[in-house]
Amino acid sequence: MSTRTSDSLATQHVGGRLAVVLFAFTLIAFVVESQLTQYVQTTLGYRQPFFIFYLVHSSFSIIFPLHILYLLATTDYTAAALLNGLRIAITHHLSPGHKSPRSEFPRAKFLRLVLALTVGITCPGLLWFSAVSLASVTDVTAIWNTNAFFAYIISVKLFKSRWEFRRLLAVVIATLGTIVVVYGGAASEKTPPTDDNLTTTSISLKPTAPLLGNLLTLVASFGYGLYQVLYKIYAALPSDPEVASDPMYEHIPDDVEDETTTGATHLDPTEAVYPPPFGFHPNLLTSLLGFMILITLWIAIPFLHWSGAEVFRVPPNALTAISIAGIALGGVVFNAGFMVLLGVWGPIIVSVGNLLTIVLVLISDIIFGAGIEVLTFWSVTGSALIVLAFGVLAYDMFRTK
């Protein structure tokens, strides 16, 4: 096995520098995506949530080709060796009984996996894009990040694990914090403005249907929590550190042997780079998700136009087009990083870390949005409760590593 591959795998452990840097970029990308999405649909008045979703998620298809180009430029690997190593890893995972490097690739199983992942990420994504144009971006971010304790609850139920007091307490506190943010924010929004000289821009920043947006985000959050757990069970490779180290995943019905004990590790690195480099497998899945969305979901655009549900309009000016491109870039970075970290850290820790976006979005709202007025007693109290809850959960998760 190539030394460079071994070095890349060494960075995958919890707290590895590469994973931490990647995590920082995903946080920033999520904030950029959230703020630009609301800016386009409110301030610029371009309310096309499905079309924007389609463009952004279709752009995921560029991630894997970019990763290949990066590896070709920074290593002495060939494209054939990289792809062959990835083929072997996926074959071992989806067809545990076939250990030979020459085993036939399980095309049908892999296609079913990609289709299931496409559905799993599309439904919550569509709900989020719809909600961000209806409710406050701070509220949407806070509710979206509850997918961490949804992921924990689903994990406990699926694996029939015992409830742990600290984790359960964190769920209760986080739920209370979410209620404070949502209903406290809704109460504040009921107060009519008293300034007769409000500008058009300030009016456009006001959420149009906060309750509906919050409910859509809650459903999306639960769906995303479920997606994360199922991804970890069925899509992540057995060599991922979280699968190997977390007792919760001991119940995964997979008889795959440790990949480091199979004959594939003795392959000539000029023939196959095995195990795959850091992030290579999840980036393949992310690109395939984007490609599936690109070739399928465009069908809904004319039907939405004819029905009047979303009358299609091209971006009216360059500013709108550039802003949508920024949303796409943020989405690419966030989802690529998220999929990689999901395999390295697991769904609960990743979701816990993503909670920091609440603070970042609130700060960006103050700087670029409505100003200090978005900082209310309810937003501060609710966010503090959620941060406290997920802080307890994060401490518990890292303590067991």
Image (spheres, rainbow, N blue to C red):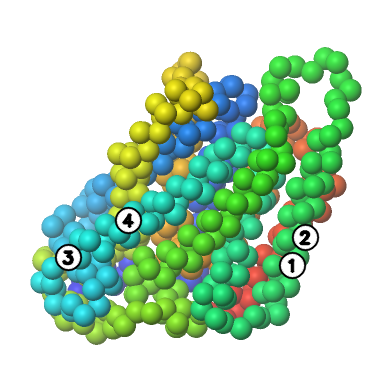
Q: Residues within 10 Å of mark 2 (few under 14, many from 20)?
A: some
Distance (Cα) linking label 1 and label 3 = 45 Å
Q: Which residue is mark 1?
A: 172
Q: Earlier in the sequence, mark 1 or mark 4?
A: 4
Viewer-nearest residue: 202 or 50:
50
Query: Which kind of residue does numbered mark 2 sit on?
Result: Leu
Query: Which kind of residue does numbered mark 1 sit on?
Result: Val
Place of residue 365 in the rendered image (x, y in percent of width and height, measured from the top left): 69, 37
Q: Earlier in the sequence, mark 1 or mark 3?
A: 3
Q: Which residue is mark 3?
A: 105
The correct choice, above or below, for 195 with respect to 356 in the image is above
Do labels 4 and 2 touch, CB within 8 Å? no
Q: Which residue is mark 4?
A: 114
Distance (Cα) linking label 4 and label 3 = 14 Å
Q: Secondary structure at mark 2?
A: helix
Q: Nearer the viewer, mark 4 or mark 2?
A: 4
